[in-house]
Amino acid sequence: MSKKSPKKSKPQIHEDLKGFDIHINEFGEIVSNKPIDKLNDFLDENVEDKKFKNLKEEEE
């Protein structure tokens, strides 16, 4: 049986996140090349929060 070959193309990313790099260093700290505040702002604008989804539906 042959194994599936992994895809070699890069995943599609949002234009605002081009060049974004994040990794965990040897001390277990998250290291990023963009400030966490900017990342949180991006996520607030583009990702719907599941916890608050039900609250919005109840208000309407």
Image: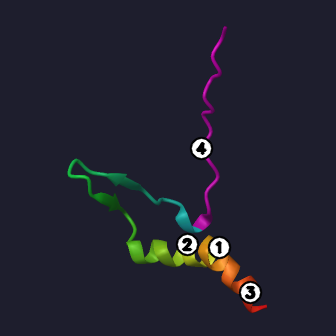
Percent of width and height locating residue 58: 74, 86
Query: CA separation, marks 1 and 2?
Result: 8 Å
Q: Residues within 10 Å of mark 4 (few under 14, many from 20)?
A: few
Q: Nearer the viewer, residue 46 or 60?
A: 60
For residue 2: magenta? yes
Residue farthest toward the top in the current orientation of the protein: 1
Badge nearest the viewer, 4 or 1 = 1
Judge whether residue 47 can be spotted in this image.
no
Which mark is first along the chain, 2 or 3?
2
Q: Closer to the camera, 24 or 50?
A: 50
Going by the image, does 50 lie left or right of 34?
Answer: right
Circle 1: residue type: Glu
**Amino acid type of the residue that numbered disc 2 sits on in the rendered structure:** Leu
Q: Residue at x 61, y 65 (%)?
A: 15
Q: Position of residue 6 (x, y in %)?
A: 60, 28
Q: Are marks 4 and 1 in contact (CB under 8 Å)?
A: no
The residue under label 1 is 48
Residue 59 in percent (x, y) is at 73, 91
- Label 1: state its secondary structure: loop
For discs 3 and 2, the disc positioned in front in the rendered view: 3
**Residue 40 sits inside the magenta stretch:** no
Q: Amino acid at mark 4?
A: Lys
Q: Earlier in the sequence, mark 3 or mark 4?
A: 4
Identify the disc placed on residue 10.
4
Q: Please tell me whether mark 3 sits on a helix, a strand or a loop.
A: helix
Residue beneath label 3, please? 58
Q: Which residue in the structure is indicated by mark 2? A: 43
Principal SS element in the magenta part? loop
Q: Mark 3 against mark 1, which lies toward the viewer?
A: 3
- In the rendered view, would you say 3 is above or below 59? above
Mark 2: secondary structure? helix
